[in-house]
Image (cartoon, rainbow, N blue to C red):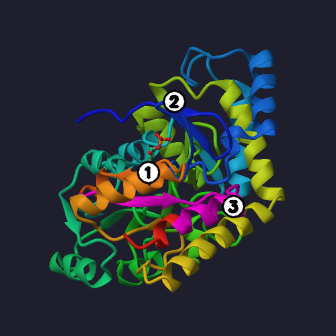
Amino acid sequence: MNEAEALAFIGENEVRWRGRTLTYFSGCDYFRLARNPQVAAAAVLSLKQNGLNVAASRFTTGNHKIYAQLESALAKFFRAETAVLFPDGYFAPLAVAQAFAGEFTHAFVDELAHGALLDADRMLDCPVQTFKHRDVANLKKALTKYGRKTRPIILTDGMFSHDGSAAPLRDYLKILPANGMILVDDAHGAGVLGATGRGTLEFENVSGERVVQCVTLSKAFGTYGGAVLATQALREKVLSRGRVFVGTTPLPPPLAGAALASLKILRSETSRRKKLFQNTAYVRTKLRAAGWEISETPGPIVRLRVMNETEVRDLKTRLLAAGIYPPFLKYGAAAQGVFRFVISSQHTKAQLDNLVEVLIKPN
Ligand SMILES: Cc1ncc(COP(=O)(O)O)c(C=O)c1O
C-alpha cells in the first residue's frame, strides 16, 4: 500500500497540493480546532511551562499534573465518572480489552469496525465473531446461537467515518444479555454527535453503565491523544491490568494543554456544532434536489455513490478545475473507493456553493 501524497495545511479550509491552493473537504478536524489560535496559544504556553515531553510512563516519573487536569475535564465533558488518557486514540480500545481479558466468553465485532477494534478483540482472550454492519437482527442471531451461558461483548465504532452513520447502540442493548457489555470506538462521534457533543452514547441516549466509550483527541478536538471514559472500577482495572497505560509515555504536555483549550471551546461555543450540521444539511439538500442519492446519516459526511473508473477520473478533474482537493477515499470501510466529503463548521457558504456547483453540473 502506498502512502498518500503529502499535503500542506495552509488555512482553515485550504491545502497546498502540487503547487496549487485547493479547498479541503477531508480529514476529521470537524471544527478546525487544529488551526484555532486559542488552542495553539494553549499548546505554546504548556510547551513553555512544561516542556515537550515527560519522557517516562505515568507509573514512574512521567505523571505531570496536566494529565489529571485533562482527565477530569474529559470526565466532565462526557459526564463520566473518570477518564484515562492514552498517547493516542488507537491505544484506548486496546487498553480496555487488556483490562477485560478473560472476562467475556465471546466477542462480536461489526464487520466494518476500525482496525483498532480488530486488534483490541484479540486481547480479550475469547472467540471473536463478526456481525453484519449495523445489523441488529444479524447480531441477535449470533448472540442467541451460544445460549444462556455466554457473557458477550460487542465491539463497534460509534460514528462510522465512511458515511457518518451511527451504531444503533440502543437496539444493541435491548438484545444484549444483562451481563454483556459494548465497547465503542467513538473516535469520530466524540465532540460531534449528541446535543452537547458527548458523542454516540448521547446521540443514542444510552448511559455508560454497560457501554464503554473510547475517544480520540485528534479529530473533533483538533489535538492529539486518546482516552477511555470509565467508571472508577474500570479505571483501576485499566491501570492495573492494561500494559498500554503502564508501558507508554503519555501525550506531550503541549497537546494536553491544547486539548484543555479545545474542550473549553466545544463546551462554550455551541454554535460551532450547530453550524457543522447546518453546513452538512445545506450540501445534502442541494445535492438531493439535483438528483443525487445521499444517505441521511447523523455525521457531517457526504458520501457519493460508488462510481466507475471514468466517472471517478472525470469528477476528480472537475473538482480540481474548481479548486477543490478531490477527497477520493480507498481505505477501510470504503475500500472499493468512494468520494467522501467531510464538512466542517468553518467552511464558508461560498466554499459549500462551489462544491455543490461542481457536483450538480451534468457530466
Ligand atoms: C475509528 C477510529 N478509531 C481510532 C482511530 C485512531 O485514533 P488516533 O489517530 O488518535 O490514534 C481512528 C483514527 O484514525 C479512527 O478513525
Give whichever of 190, 60 is nearer the camera: 190
Residue at x-position 41% and y-position 73%: 362
Q: Is 342 placed above or below 59 here?
A: below
Query: Can residue 36 be seen in this snapshot?
Result: yes
Q: Is 298 placed above or below 223 here?
A: below
Q: Amino acid at mark 2?
A: Gly
Look at mark 2 in the image and give the residue it sits on: 19
Q: Quadrant of the C terminus?
A: bottom left
Q: Is residue 273 magenta?
A: no
Q: Which mark is residue 326?
A: 1
Residue 208, image x, y percentages: 56, 66
Determine the secondary structure under disc 2. loop
Q: Is 90 placed above or below 161 here?
A: above
Determine the secondary structure under disc 1. loop
Residue 140, image x, y percentages: 26, 82
- Magenta segment: 336-357
Q: Which mark is residue 350?
A: 3
Q: Say which of marks 1 and 2 sits in front.
A: 2
Q: Amino acid at mark 3?
A: Ala
Asked whether mark 3 lies closer than 8 Å to ligand 1, one says no
